[in-house]
Each structure stands twice: as structure tokens, then as C-alpha cells.
Image (cartoon, rainbow, N blue to C red):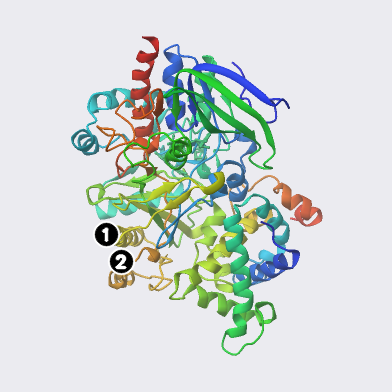
Amino acid sequence: MSEIHHIDNVGGGALIEDSADVVIIGTGPGGATAARVLTEAGVDVIMIEEGAPYPAGLRRGDAWSAMKLSWRDRSFQIAKGRSITPMIQGCAVGGSTPINGAIIHRTPAPIIANWAKKHGMNEVINEAGLNRVFGRLDEELSVAPTPKSAWGNNNRLFGLAADRLGWKAAPTSRSVAGCEGTARCNQGCPTAVKQSMDVTYIPQAMARGARTYATCRAEKLLRDGDRAAGVEGRFRDPLSGRVGPLLRVKARRAVIVSAGAIHTPVFLQNNRAGRSSGQLGKNLICHPGTSLIADFEEPVDFWFGATQGYECTEFWGELMKFEVVGLPPSVAVARLPGYGPELMRSASRIRHLAHWGLQVRATSEGSVRRGMFGGRPSIKYSINAFDVSLMKKAYARLVEMAFAAGAKRVLPGVPGIPQVLESYDGIRPLFDLPDDPRLFHCIAAHLFGTAAIGTEANNSVVSETGEVWDTPGLYVMDASNLPTNMGVNPQHTICGVSWLMSERLADVVSA
Amino acid sequence: MRLFAFEKRLLAIIADAMLPSGVPGGLQRGAASVPTEAFLSDFEKYAPGESMLGVRAATWIITLLPLLWRFKLRPFGALRPTDRYALLNRLEQSRFYLIRELPNLLKIVVCMAWCSDPRVQRDLHFLSPDSAPPQWLLEASEPATSER
Ligand SMILES: Cc1cc2nc3c(=O)[nH]c(=O)nc-3n(C[C@H](O)[C@H](O)[C@H](O)COP(=O)(O)OP(=O)(O)OC[C@H]3O[C@@H](n4cnc5c(N)ncnc54)[C@H](O)[C@@H]3O)c2cc1C
Ligand code: SF4
């Protein structure tokens, strides 16, 4: 198996050339799964990844070190709208998976049914196909409910709350082989037991002959007539910005763009592909989320326990879902209200604080446009009044959970609401506030829809096979091709859809 | 985008007001025990220009705001500590979103610096603090970081 090529080991020449049947841009769940399926079918594959390898030896507990090495824009990628919404993504070998919570959900049946009805997804992407693939994914990525030994108090109290309220909740299913409960999933698993793509499908594909070029941003689509025929990219050190050689790879059969919901449309826009419907970069949808802090008499020690080891799906039908979130410590302190002595006193109670979050299946839509002169993309997203009203309802329920579990105080961090709530009644004034997106500090980590699947070239960017309508041989396989959000964590769906599309592509290549 | 050395000092003063040392009933080691200016040198190398612009704007606005505030007529750094805390807490409660967000952006940056220090991680009782300080902290404060 070859090692991962990157700026420090490719030498100082001006040009590196290679060729393969299929070239994949991006190594998140979309790209890595495609590499896994295609190489198994005997297809020769090259992967190109802008981020660097992020091995266990580099992973520290402090947030800044992790963000510097493995987060897109060091965690400062934002969408602008009526409020500022951080749109967080990974930028490393493995995409966002080295820093994600490893929560695994199958695509809910009503969502698949809706895709069939409204987006014509039947032949390649359907319930039977997805369920077959989910079984394989579960097995290969060690998916299992978070074991009790890795709960810690943050997760245990959440479960207790749901139990007392009679709400449907369970330890989250996660793709981890032997979680030690270090609560550091978002900084990168220190022992690499999390089954992110960098320790699973990427090495598997490489063992079957795939080559990976990391620290290389794909910039130009090479064409043969109309057809996608390869990719050019430039090596660049993600930390220093030092520029390395040009990479030119020929794709004998196909190019797959798996650069994620923000950078896939940017690559297509830059290369004048996927524009026939006018939908490229539009329809940016997500699951905005926010969190609360609950203060317990007993120590919670949220730094022990699976980062996101318990969830409540009681209100999935009402477009909301609750999860434990083991925040990185600096983020947890920054979330505490107040400044000065007040903040230092709250920080001294950090052992007693639990962190729980909510996400909503939002109806709001935004857009992504390539930046000027190759700069950062312009992301627009405003949470609409309906979604804010959903968040209020969800927030109140989360407060209810905290008190049900025995919290003494809740620190909501919502302007217009007292900074400290001592009972559930304290949250009621939230409903008198306007449905304004600036009420909550939201973030979005589940982003979709900017190069969506559809039935025709005039209403979508790609067909059900993932092929871009106006550019033969060019495919999109990642979160950007999902036409709707799902209300559940998306990694498995992204892998599943990519798997089915890649099986189809493998048939085409071998034919 | 880089901050000037004096801008880093202004921000270090704000950091000290956000997380002051020696608070009775609070943690004893505040932001001043971590070389915030060294962190900022690392941060500004890597953070996107737009975020640095936000950091710079927030630093200036918070520094100059007291000139207009309740006849204090002096910059943030010349206020008494209690007035500094009061100002930051007032900004957090502002009706205006952007005003609320100004100190919040700095709080995130300051907390990232503070919690990078394994000594602070131990003060906070983390189960497994980082075994060594990050490179920027090592370079900035060899003697301080070897202290337990
Ligand atoms: C902090 C966090 C926690 C999360 N937790 C969960 C969870 O618990 N469960 C879950 O299901 N989902 C979770 N998610 C979401 C999930 O990880 C993403 O939805 C998923 O990884 C998206 O997959 P993708 O293949 O579309 O893109 P990504 O995983 O984002 O990968 C895209 C890759 O493409 C690279 N790239 C971009 N442009 C280029 C270019 N031009 N050239 C070369 N490479 C390029 C990027 O650097 C990146 O590595 C989380 C996300 C984050 C950020
Ligand atoms: S909780 Fe810790 S050990 Fe478990 S997967 Fe996450 S980082 Fe790894």
C-alpha cells in the first residue's frame, strides 16, 4: 500500500502527473465510500484532498490545536444572514469524520419515501438498496449503541431525564470500536478508535491500490470535449500556505466531486459545470442547533463519557431532536454567561455542568457562491421565523429535561431571558420574544442540498446516478446531492447514497 | 491579517477583565497567567482574515466605548476593574445583536488561549489534561509552564 502523498513528501518538482479510472475530490464519507466501493470492484482510483492527514499523534485536547489542524477555516466558516451562523466542517484526510461525533442513523423511511415521490429517487436510491447497504456499513464501521461503560454522567443524566419524562431516548449508535469515553470526538479521537474515514475506508481503498494526494486543492476540471477527463490541483501547506507542485491527474472514466455541501458547488461553479438548472449553490439546507448548560449538585465531569452518547427522538415528528454534546472545554467556558468574577465563579463549577443540545429539521434555505478571485465562498443563510419558533419549543423541552434530571440551575444564554433559571417556569418568557434568529447562538454541522438530485436537467444539478446533467463523466457524491434534510445525523445516509451510486458507476466502468 | 503589538496588549487587558485572576470563590488562575499575546500571534497566523477583522474591531470598540459611557471618559484599560466587568456584562445584555456579539467573539478567542494551558486544564479538573502545552505556549513561557 502506498503512503498518503502530501506537500512534505512529494518533492520539489513543478508537476506531478498520474492517472486512474476514477478521480475523487474530497475524502469525507461521500468520497471515501466511493473509493471503498469502486476499488472493491477493481476500479483504479485516485483521491485528492485539500486537508492534511490528521493522525492520532497530532490530536490534542485543546480546541485551538484541533481547529488549526483539521477544521475548515479553523472553525470560523460562517454563513451571513440576519444572524451569523457558523457552518462547521472538517478539512482533513477523512473530511469531517475525524472531528464528528460518530453518531449513526439510518435514513428515516418517511424521508426516503419523500425522495421517491418528490425527487424521483427510485431506481438507484431506494429503501431496499439503502437498507442493504446500511447493514454492510454498520458491520464495517463497528456501529453499536454507546456502551454503558462510556456514558459518564453527562450522558447518564440525559437518559435519566428522558426516562422520568417518559420520552423516547436511547444511547446513540456510533461508529466506534471500543469507545474510551474521552469526550474528545470534536478534537479528533486521541486513540483513533472512532471509525472515521481516515482509519477505515481510505486505508482500505489504498490497500487495494488507490492513491491519495492530500494537502492538494482540486481547482480545475480537465475536459475532453464536454466530458470530464481529469483534475488539476495545487499542493499547499494548510498551515504555512507554502505552495508546492501542480498535480495533474487524468480520469479515464469519471471524476467524482465529494468536496462537501459548501465546496462541491464552488468547484462546479468555478468550472462552469452543473449550471443548467440554475439550482447549483442554492437550496443550502441544514439542521441548525444550539445548546444549554445545566448545573447539577453532583459532579458531572462532562469530559468523561462519549462526546454524544445519548439522544432523544421523541419529537422527531415535530422536526426536533435532542443530543448530549460534550463540548471542548474552552467552548464550554465561553458558553457560560457573564464576564469577570461571575464568569470565573461559574467556571469553577465546571465539574458540575452538563451540556445538552438540540437540532431542528429547518425549513430555511440559503446559498453558496464562489468567492471572488478564488477567495472563500460567500455563504448566505438566515433562520426563518418558523424555524426560530421550532427552536424555542425545542429549547423549552431541553430545559424541561434538565430540571427533570435534577439540575439545580439552567444557564440558557438567551438574551431577554434571565441568565440563570431555577425552575422550568423561568423559560416561559421565551415564548413572548419575537421569532428572531438572533435569539440563539446556533451552529450548523449538517449541511446539504447545494447540488441536489432530481429528475430533470432543468430542476436539479445531478441525476439519481450522481452524474451532473450537463457534464458527462462528472459525478457528485456527498452531502450536497441530498435534496432535503432528514432530521437525523447524516453520515450514514451520505455513505449509503454514495455506495449505491458508486456500485452503479462501477458497473458502467467495467462495462 | 496581523494585530499590532499594542493592539495585542489592549486585547490582553480585555482578556484579563473577562477571566480575572484571584477571584474569591472562583478559579485562581485567570487569563493573565496565560501569555494571551503569544496565543494571538499564533491565532492571527491561521485564522481567516475576516475573523481577525472582527477581533480587531471588537478590541477597538471595547477599548474606546467607555469614552462615551456614563461620563467615564477614559479607555477600557484605564477603568477600575469593577467598571470593566460592568461594561462587559452590559454589552452582553445589549439589545443590539452586533454589540452583544463583540465581546462574545473575544471571549471565544480568550477561552481558547486559556484552556490550552495544561495548568488551567488541571485547575478545571479535567480527567486527562494535555500532557504538554501547545507549541506557542512553550515558546512563550518556558518557566511558567513547568510550574505546577
Ligand atoms: C463537528 C461535527 C460533528 C458532526 N457530528 C456528526 C455525527 O455525529 N454524525 C453524523 O452523521 N454527522 C455528523 N456531522 C456531519 C457529517 O460529518 C457531515 O455531514 C459529513 O462528513 C459530510 O460528508 P461529505 O462527504 O459531504 O463532506 P466532508 O466530510 O465535509 O468532506 C469533504 C472533504 O472535501 C475536501 N475538499 C473540499 N474542497 C476540496 C477541493 N477543492 N479539493 C480537494 N479537497 C476538497 C474537504 O477538505 C473535506 O475534507 C458532524 C460534522 C461536524 C463538522
Ligand atoms: S468519546 Fe473519546 S474515545 Fe470515544 S470515540 Fe470520541 S474521542 Fe474516541
Q: Residue furthest right?
A: B143
User: Which chain does the numbered disc 2 sit on?
Assistant: A
The residue that label 1 is drawn on is A386
Whether residue B74 is situated above or below residue B104 in the rendered picture: below
On residue A375, the disc is none
Asked whether A134 or A190 is in front, the reply is: A134
- Horizontal relation, residue B88 to residue A262: left or right: right
Marks 2 and 1 in Cβ contact (< 8 Å): yes
User: From where the camera sits, is residue A192 visible?
Assistant: no
Element on which disc 1 rests: helix
Asked whether A413 or A381 is in front, the reply is: A381
- Horizontal relation, residue A324 to residue B21: left or right: left
Label 1 CB-ligand 1 distance < 8 A:
no
Whether residue A112 is situated above or below residue A71 in the rendered picture: above
User: Which chain does the numbered disc 1 sit on?
Assistant: A
Measure how far apart labels 2 and 1 are at the Cα level.
8 Å
Are discs 2 and 1 both within one chain?
yes
The C terminus of chain A, quarter of image: top left
The residue that label 2 is drawn on is A435
Give, as a three-letter code, the residue at label 1. Phe
Q: Residue at x 44, y 14 (%)?
A: A40
Splitting the image into 4 quarters, where does residue A246 fall?
A: top right
Give, as a three-letter code, the residue at label 2. Asp
Q: Residue at x 33, y 27 (%)?
A: A134
Splitting the image into 4 quarters, where does residue A48 fall?
A: top right
Q: Position of residue B78 (x, y in %)?
A: 69, 81
Q: Residue at x 47, y 33 (%)?
A: A28
- Horizontal relation, residue A351 to residue A241: left or right: left
Q: Position of residue A225 (x, y in %)?
A: 44, 22
Q: Residue at x 58, y 47 (%)?
A: A67
